[in-house]
Image: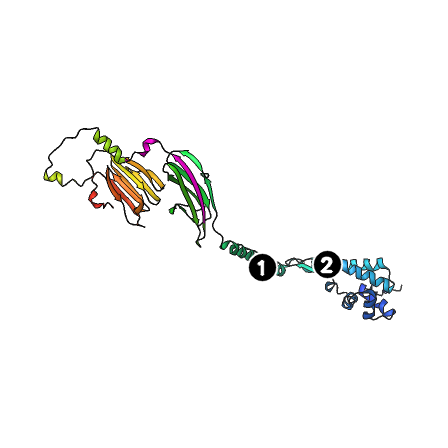
Amino acid sequence: MKGFSTKKVAGETLGEILRKKREQMKLSIERLALRTNIQPRYIKYLEENKFHLLPPPIYVKGFLKSCTKCLKIDEKEILSQYEKELELINKKLEKQNEGKIRTRVINPWVVINPRNFTIFAGILIFILCVSYLVYQVSNFGKPPKLIIERPKDEIEIDGDKISIVGETEIGAMVFINDQPIFVDRQGRFKEEIVLQDGINIIKIKAVNRIEKETTEVRKVNASLPQDQYLTQEDTLNKEVAGSTTEKEDLSGEQSSKETKSNTKGEELVLEVRIGPKAAWIYVEEDGKLAYQGTMLPQTSQVFKAKEGITLTTGRAESTQVIFNGQDLGKLGKEGEVIRGLEFTHDLDISQFKKD
């Protein structure tokens, strides 16, 4: 029995079909390009099956339709052949990348791989950095924000105290009538203000790091009870006028104590008067906080204690004190800050120089 031998016949590729038909019609690539309005290099890539150098498939199919009309080839067969060969190329690429970092071919023009991903990420980071710099530069010269939540402007209240509550940008300083106040890390602030009777002008100012300013003004009409107009000196004079005093001969030892403020056991009374500028003060009565805040010009407060009163003021030249009826004058010079000044039974008032 005779054996059979087979002859392997290789099928023609899309490029071979196009080239063979073009040569049969004795057309050069340039002549075919003129008739189809396709660039010669694309016709060459088609004939050489270099699909990766061609535009996206939707354009390639348009090229093939033009070629089939000019070369008188069946359009459906050519398009079907192109899709089959393109699918084989994609499968071959996927198989080559098995077990490696996968490279997904979306189309011959767009490939996502580690190198391209790094490039895209770098571009994105660059855009974000530039956007941030533009934002910072645009806001660099702006004054700080300043929001006063309360009080509202032009209000009337009964009493001598009011709280200023608001918000500014982080890092900015806040001043009330030119006195600095505490601002927390979120830019929030709250400060109690002592008012005088009548119209009070409260100026709140925020200053940022480049010394740009934003200012808000509040007008508050305060109605104080009549008894709050009495100063501590008036109160002490009334107490003295209503009581009888006994005259005693002072010995040499007693006369040496004339500079002492008063006798132990009596109540300590300290009146604080502010002017001509506002001042921030902190007062403790017998070790307990009595007041902390800003006092406006022409305002006063009275503090009482059994053992001692401690006073801190941020503006000594605007802080006048009257201790147990004795006017001790202003506490210091312009720009001077007084911290922890104690008023006790043993206070030597000779250290104070009344202006």
Residue located farthest toward the front when viewing the structure as drawn: 198
Does residue 317 show up? yes
Front-most of residues 178 and 163: 178
Q: Position of residue 27 (x, y in %)?
A: 85, 70
- The numbered mark at residue 90 is 2
Look at the image and give the residue range highlighted in magenta: 214-231
Within 10 angstroms of label 1, few (less than 14), some, or many (20 or more) residues? few
Does the segment drawn in magenta span residue 217?
yes
Q: Position of residue 169 (x, y in %)?
A: 47, 48
Task: Choose top left, top right, bottom left or bottom right for residue 325.
Answer: top left
In the rendered structure, the answer to whether residue 20 lies left or right of residue 262 reads: right
Query: What residue does disc 1 label?
Result: 122
Q: Mark 2 or mark 1: which is in front?
A: 1
> Which structural element holds mark 2?
helix
Q: Residue at x 32, y 38 (%)?
A: 300
- The numbered mark at residue 321 is none
Q: Are marks 2 and 1 in contact (CB under 8 Å)?
A: no
> Which structural element holds mark 1?
helix
Front-most of residues 254 and 227: 227
Q: How is the image coloured?
A: rainbow
Front-most of residues 35 and 316: 316
Q: What is the quadrant of the N terminus in the image?
A: bottom right
Does residue 8 show up? no
Does the segment drawn in magenta span residue 26?
no
State how far apart marks 2 and 1 are (Cα).
29 Å
Q: Give the amino acid at mark 2.
A: Asn
Task: Choose top left, top right, bottom left or bottom right for residue 257.
Answer: top left
**Mark toward the start of the polypeptide (2 vs 1):** 2
Task: Choose top left, top right, bottom left or bottom right for residue 327.
Answer: top left
Q: Give the amino acid at mark 1.
A: Gly
In the rendered structure, the answer to whether residue 220 lies left or right of residue 318 reads: right
Q: Position of residue 254 (x, y in %)?
A: 13, 38
